[in-house]
Image (cartoon, grey):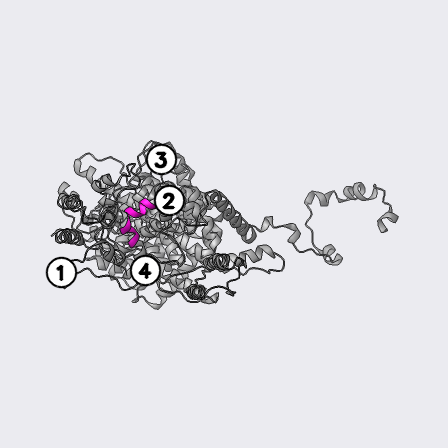
């Protein structure tokens, strides 16, 4: 009877938890095109759509007949686009702004002549390729540079007590056109004409090369970010700058699919074996583990009653499967632990194969439709580093023979047969990363600067971007993190924090409840989009730099760590993450292009509160996954940074994030928990066996990695500072050798020993020296006695 009641209780738990469905979220470089277009505009900018249209129609009627834009032929379209482009070069600011608004209306798809969103998007694509072909983008970059250097606007904004949309009108119009062009052209459409495909590839190359103001466009935008954060230009519309920066980086460097193909290509070039699996495909095929149930009174009562009545029948330790306690609570007694389950911080209800037989009695058979399905095998092929094989052999030799052979991984004389088998298995799964090859090559260049030869550097878009941002990279990272902090929902409003709402607040503040609600939604949405853009920028740069050269990645990562990126991301997750992911901060009827082709219904407080019917907010889930991936990138194989996760008590914060039923997000949370498990203590592991099982089931295994125990030889606390210092020294040597040609060691420079070539070199003498040459000869040569005998000896 007791066992029967226990099984019933287990079934109720599983049944209750399985009702919450997986989030139907597919991770990608960007959201759908329409969503990415709508997020460019704040709802406060709504009235400007009609203003853009008016400016276009005035220009159009002045020079063209009464025909519609959609009725003209290609030659007429081109002629009018050229006419508008000439109008951008006028001196009068007001006139220039009107022409820019007319161009913006073209980039928005001349929506007044369209009857559907699909038609708007069709004309957007056509008009934008036309604008690019006549040279609009270069003109816009020049105008943007003028606005950045506009000291009058900057000083006026600094003096103003409150900044609104009106202060950034010129900048917003220019950035809107540029963003629409980059976002539209980067969308690869199979139906594009062949000439469009050529234009697209040319534009990609130009955007990533130092053609605009002798620097890639991304470097110019980074400069805007730092100028904004320094307080010298508080009127900059930061959301639009960050969105354009993100899309420029994405378009020029490539997204996650391109990263995977670059990685495969590089491994072939270096003669490395192919990747064991396609990580993108594996992650997409993974299923989420069941999150914890809402701790309903019924289940809690059943659990407590079952524990009280049947303690004699069930071993106390076996309750660990249903008994998860916060490790940071002071009270450790087992009795209290029984009555104070923290079901909120665990992955519940998904029974894992390792625990099923040990913890629970055999379950009552259920119909096939209700049966829980278990995955076949593990999703990832295990990996082993060369260092792991060396450590294993060293410990085996010391144990069985009593001698060591350094880095020799081939000699197995005197070792028992099982050790031979183990070494064979380890070598079968040995994985050599591109980073390891790059580090060994860099060591060779440092050891042999003369005989090592010249390094051939592939001047790819990533390399050009790194060279562009290298001098000010620390400032760029600090600026991005400052804005991320200001946009995080957990941040409190402080007087010293930067104002990121300059491009969302209207000139006149709302006077009605409805206007206040609309502005509140707009402000929250604005912050969410900023978080989305910054998280995507940081992740893309880290991944591309890591592939291009490991020390480029380490340089950026180290400056993120120095700027407190790790505690900032943990602070971001220290909130009700389910509320953030399901937030409804959008008003779909006001989104572009819906709002320009449909009659707008009357907004009410009820409709604003209701929001949309989506299961989750795509951008917020995308941001969370990006931030988790950044945290993984910063801490992987870095003991000092892993200890930061432990010191900042990240385990309970991360476990709360496991509530989100999305496989990719859970995977990166479990990775972060795995690296710190050995430091959290035995009691934590006992209380979190479900989480341990999930890590075993979903995260890649490193053979010989005792992640679940505290036996890591590398984790000596006193070495942490030395580890970061050694890394920093390696990075500085790399940057100095490859990029700092002015301070190269004079001992390593070639010396010209030929008298004729030295005397034959042309030396440019200053003008005043040439005028007073006779005086110089008299003073320095003729008037000084020379002992020719001594000189000749």
The residue to which callout 4 is attached is 187
Distance from label 1 to label 4 (Cα)? 49 Å
* Label 3: element kind: loop
Distance from label 3 to label 4 (Cα)? 36 Å
User: Magenta region, mostly helix, strand or loop?
Assistant: helix
Mark whose residue sits in front, 1 or 4? 1
Distance from label 3 to label 1 (Cα)? 57 Å
Distance from label 4 to label 2 (Cα)? 38 Å
Q: Residue furthest left?
A: 1
In primary-sequence order, the first of circles 4 and 2 is 4
- Above or below for 232 versus 582: above
Query: Could you say which disc has been placed on residue 497 in the image?
Result: 3
Task: Give residue 459's position: percent from left, percent from top.
Answer: 49, 59
The residue to which callout 1 is attached is 366
Query: Could you say which disc has been placed on residue 645 in the image?
Result: 2
Range covered by the magenta-colored residues = 681-693
Q: Nearer the viewer, residue 263 or 510?
A: 263
Task: Give residue 340's position: percent from left, percent from top.
Answer: 22, 40
Q: Residue furthest front?
A: 312
């Amino acid at each position: 009877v007791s066992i029967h009641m226990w099984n019933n209780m287990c079934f109720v738990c599983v049944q209750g938890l399985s009702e919450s469905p997986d989030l139907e979220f597919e991770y990608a470089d960007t959201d759908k095109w329409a969503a990415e277009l709508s997020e460019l505009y704040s709802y406060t900018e709504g009235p400007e759509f009609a203003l853009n249209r008016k400016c276009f129609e005035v220009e159009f009627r002045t020079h063209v007949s009464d025909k519609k834009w959609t009725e003209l032929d290609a030659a007429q379209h081109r002629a009018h686009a050229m006419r508008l482009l000439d109008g951008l070069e006028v001196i009068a600011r007001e006139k220039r702004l009107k022409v820019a608004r007319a161009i913006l209306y073209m980039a928005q798809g001349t929506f007044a002549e369209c009857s559907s969103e699909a038609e708007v998007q069709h004309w957007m694509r056509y008009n934008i390729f036309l604008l690019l072909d006549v040279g609009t983008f270069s003109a816009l970059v020049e105008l943007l540079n003028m606005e950045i250097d506009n000291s009058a606007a900057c000083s006026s904004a600094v003096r103003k007590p409150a900044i609104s949309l009106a202060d950034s009108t010129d900048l917003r119009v220019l950035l809107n056109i540029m963003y629409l062009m980059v976002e539209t052209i980067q969308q690869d459409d199979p139906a594009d004409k062949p000439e469009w495909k050529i234009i697209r590839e040319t534009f990609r190359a130009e955007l990533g090369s130092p053609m605009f103001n002798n620097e890639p466009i991304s470097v110019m935008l980074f400069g805007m970010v730092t100028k904004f954060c320094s307080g010298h230009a508080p009127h900059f519309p930061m959301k639009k700058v960050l969105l354009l920066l993100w899309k420029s980086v994405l378009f020029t460097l490539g997204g996650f699919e391109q990263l995977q193909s670059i990685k495969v290509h590089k491994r072939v070039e270096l003669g490395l074996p192919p990747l064991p699996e396609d990580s993108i495909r594996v992650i997409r095929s993974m299923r989420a583990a069941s999150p914890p149930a809402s701790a309903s009174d019924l289940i809690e009562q059943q659990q407590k009653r079952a524990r009280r009545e049947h303690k004699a029948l069930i071993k106390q330790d076996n309750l660990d499967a249903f008994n998860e306690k916060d490790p940071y609570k002071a009270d450790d007694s087992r009795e209290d632990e029984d009555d104070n389950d923290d079901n909120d911080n665990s992955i519940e209800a998904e029974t894992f194969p390792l625990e099923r037989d040990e913890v629970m009695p055999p379950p009552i058979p259920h119909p096939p439709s209700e049966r829980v399905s278990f995955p076949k095998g593990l999703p990832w092929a295990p990996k082993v580093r060369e260092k792991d094989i060396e450590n294993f052999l060293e410990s085996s030799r010391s144990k069985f023979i009593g001698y060591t052979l350094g880095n020799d991984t081939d000699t197995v004389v005197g070792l028992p047969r099982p050790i031979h088998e183990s070494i064979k298995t380890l070598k079968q799964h040995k994985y050599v990363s591109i980073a390891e090859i790059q580090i060994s090559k860099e060591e060779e260049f440092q050891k042999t600067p003369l005989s090592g030869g010249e390094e051939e550097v592939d001047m790819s878009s990533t390399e050009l971007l790194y060279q562009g941002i290298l001098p000010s990279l620390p400032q760029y990272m600090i600026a991005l993190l400052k804005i991320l902090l200001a946009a995080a929902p957990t941040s409190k409003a402080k007087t010293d924090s930067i104002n990121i709402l300059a491009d969302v607040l209207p000139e006149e503040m709302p006077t009605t409840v409805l206007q206040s609600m609309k502005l509140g939604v707009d402000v929250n949405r604005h912050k969410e989009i900023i978080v989305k853009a910054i998280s995507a920028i940081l992740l893309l740069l880290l991944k591309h730099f890591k592939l291009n050269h490991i020390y480029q990645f380490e340089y950026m990562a180290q400056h993120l760590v120095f700027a407190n990126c790790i505690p900032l991301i943990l602070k971001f997750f220290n909130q009700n993450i389910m509320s953030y992911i399901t937030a409804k901060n959008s008003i779909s009827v006001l989104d572009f292009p819906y709002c320009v082709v449909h009659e707008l219904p009357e907004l009410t407080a009820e409709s604003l509160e209701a929001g949309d019917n989506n299961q989750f907010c795509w951008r917020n889930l995308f941001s969370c996954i990006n931030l988790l991936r950044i945290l993984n990138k910063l801490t992987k194989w870095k003991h000092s940074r892993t200890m930061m996760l432990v010191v900042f008590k990240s385990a309970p914060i991360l476990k709360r994030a496991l509530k989100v039923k999305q496989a990719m997000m859970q995977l990166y949370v479990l990775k972060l928990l795995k690296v710190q498990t050995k430091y959290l203590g035995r009691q934590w592991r006992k209380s979190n066996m479900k989480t341990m099982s999930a890590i075993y089931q979903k995260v890649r295994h490193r053979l010989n990695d005792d992640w679940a125990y505290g036996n890591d030889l590398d984790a000596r606390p006193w070495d942490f500072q030395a580890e970061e210092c050694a890394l920093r020294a390696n990075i500085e040597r790399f940057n100095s050798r490859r990029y700092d040609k002015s301070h190269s060691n004079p001992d390593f420079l070639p010396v010209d020993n030929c008298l004729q070539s030295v005397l034959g070199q042309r030396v440019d003498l200053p003008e005043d020296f040439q005028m007073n040459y006779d005086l110089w000869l008299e003073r320095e040569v003729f008037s000084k006695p020379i002992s020719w005998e001594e000189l000749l000896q």
